[in-house]
Image (spheres, grey):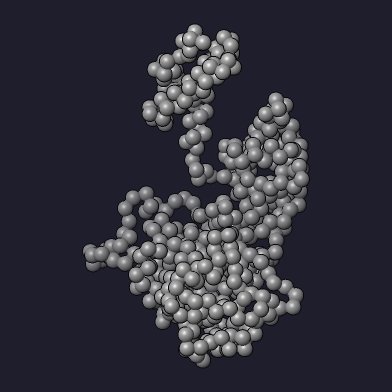
Amino acid sequence: MTTLYRRLPAVHRLLETPELVAAIKQYGRPAVVGACRRALGELRTAAARGALGNEQLELECASLPSRVVQTLVETWRRPYAEIINATGVLLHTNLGRAPLPSPMPAQLAGYLALEYELEEGRRGQRLAPLADRLRETLGVESAVMVNNNAAALALLLRTHADGREVVVSRGQLIEIGGSFRLPDVMAAAGARLVEVGCTNRTHLEDYRRAIGEATAAVLVAHQSNYRVIGFTSEPPLDELARLAHDHNLPLLVDQGSGAVHDLGRWGLPHEPTVGELLAAGADAVCFSGDKLLGGPQAGIVAGRSRWVDPLARHPLFRALRPDKTALVWMDRVLEAHRAGRLEDIPLYALLDVPEGVLRRRARRIARSLTKNGVPATAVATRSALGGGTTPGATLASWGVAVQAAPPLAAALRTGAPPVVGTMHDDTVVLDLRAVFSSQDRTLEAAVATAYKASQNRQATGR
């Protein structure tokens, strides 16, 4: 046993190998030294158990530098890796929702006038320029931006309904993603929930009976990721607005999706836009910035000055305000909306790709993969907007199906770059609706590499 231990290389000898000299430059000496010691410790443990003979030990020692590098690669892999989204879901919450325009705005690489008035040479308000952009783009009296839509709704309720009642239909007590539950957000904001109506039917008279001296607002919540169909009823928004205003109450709408254009243009069901909701009588509408607006993560409240202006003065606003990156990115996205250049917003550029173009791309990729020994075929698919928008509605799309066991999906996810698709029985389907055409060659190479790797794993039983 002592003889086996003596044959293990010293750490300083390992560090002199070319692979680890390069690793030190990339990961730093302490990280490489630690990885070496752990690898040597594993070999000592194996030798102590009698699991290593002389010949095998020599092989293990020879491969030590590459093993250490592999360990470092896995340990220091970027946690927010850039991926190819082949799921067919454009606003995939787990994959970052709306992709942002490129390149990165130049001012984010250095200093910028975030809270500084250039003309006056004094401190300014960070949100003021973007609030102006939002008012111009949305055509509203006032607007405020915070770091997400849950924060927007919480700030709205905390400002206007703290310690008081807010009336909501039972059919709108939504839960999104397991972490956003409307009753919980309302409670955290200090508002008392008053439920009216039934799950499938709520009438104007239900709201009327619930309004009392302790009522602070009427709230309408967008049915974000589901639909109640069949024997259903809810009052039109304009009637609900008149009822609220007759009692000097605001009608607040959590629209969620951030729709500012008619989705019928892309063959999708119409979602009430922010402008339409305000025109129908809503006093304040809150929504996400990284859904149908196509921008960075943000929560926006837009509407009447009486109800929106106080939000930026509330003490809680400082804890929820957006950072410089979100403000700069949002300004770029709003500029594209205002100028009618939707092709500059990646979400809409992807939506605009005709089905025929996706079909041709899918067939070309499938032919190329087949020539490389990958059993791939082009298939018609249905993609979705996602992100809690247009639930149940889909878009015609095309993708590439690869006949393979589940290990291929894992190999794709852990490849470089990672590729995320969907599994249907023993077939991996890679929908091209959310894949940029510039990624086609990279996707093709990633699939070929992952297929070979998964086949090798199956052959060796690993």
Q: Quadrant of residue 170?
A: bottom right
Query: Quick check: can you spot residue 341?
Result: no
Image quadrant where one finds the C terminus: top right
Pick the front one: 254 or 358: 254
What residue appears at the point 48 percent right and 30 percent down from the top-left corner? Answer: 72
Of all residues, the one furthest to the left in this rendering is 121
* Residue 396 left/right relative to 162: right
* Whether residue 456 is situated above or below residue 359 in the rendered picture: above
Pick the front one: 305 or 361: 305
* Whether residue 348 is situated above or below residue 47 in the rendered picture: below
Pick the front one: 411 or 137: 411
* Residue 95 left/right relative to 132: right
What residue appears at the point 55 percent right and 13 percent down from the top-left corner? Answer: 57
Task: Give the x, y percent position of residue 279.
Answer: 54, 82
Task: Give the x, y percent position of residue 300.
Answer: 47, 68
Pick the front one: 244 or 112: 244
* Whether residue 296 is situated above or below residue 277 in the rendered picture: above
What residue appears at the point 67 percent right and 41 percent down from the top-left corner? Answer: 409
Query: Quick check: can you spot residue 173?
Result: yes
